[in-house]
Amino acid sequence: MTAKIEEKLGTLHYTIDKEAHIKVNFDACNDCENKACIRGCPAQCFELVQDEVKFQYEDCIECGTCKILCDKKAIEWNYPRGTFGVVFRKG
């Protein structure tokens, strides 16, 4: 039996930086009809709250999916600074 994505995400260990490695231009998000970042992020870092896109970087798995899917080019994505981000992957 294959593990669900939520189970696999639960095996990750993070060292969270106080400085976000992803910056989002929320003005561009407000004009976006697609909002693919919400549906595409496997870690669910993006969500729609009262018709506004909200973002939290702390659970990012560093896959870059949000940047690739963003039609508005509103996401500036970088890997976290050294020693921060995902530090252990199992499975």
Image: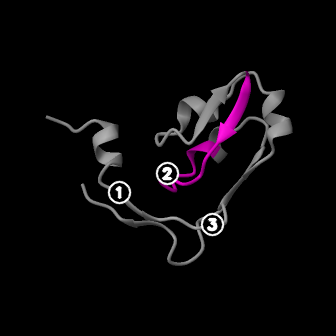
Question: Which mark, by number, is residue 33?
Answer: none
Q: Quadrant of the N terminus?
A: top left
Q: Position of residue 64 (x, y in %)?
A: 57, 51
Q: In the image, is residue 53 above or below residue 81?
A: above
**What is the secondary structure assignment of the residue under circle 2?**
loop
Span of residues in magenta: 51-66
For the residues labelled 3 and 1, the Cα–Cα distance comes to 19 Å
For mark 1, give the secondary structure: loop
Amino acid on which disc 1 is placed: Leu
Amino acid on which the number 3 mark rests in the picture: Lys
Residue 70 magenta-drawn?
no
Q: Amino acid at mark 2?
A: Asp
Q: Are marks 2 and 3 in contact (CB under 8 Å)?
A: no
Residue behind mark 2:
59
- Which residue has dot 1 on it? 12
Q: Is residue 65 magenta?
A: yes
Contact check, label 2 and label 1, Cβ < 8 Å = no
For numbered disc 3, what is the local secondary structure? loop
Q: Earlier in the sequence, mark 3 or mark 1?
A: 1
Residue at the (70%, 33%) spot, across then down: 53
Residue 38, image x, y percentages: 60, 32
When asked about the image quadrant of residue 39, the answer is top right
Q: Are the residues flagged by discs 3 and 1 in contact, CB closer than 8 Å?
A: no
Front residue of 17 and 67? 17
> What residue does disc 3 label?
18
Res 28 quadrant in image: top right
Per the picture, the main secondary structure of the magenta-coloured stretch is: loop
Point 60% across, 74% down: residue: 81
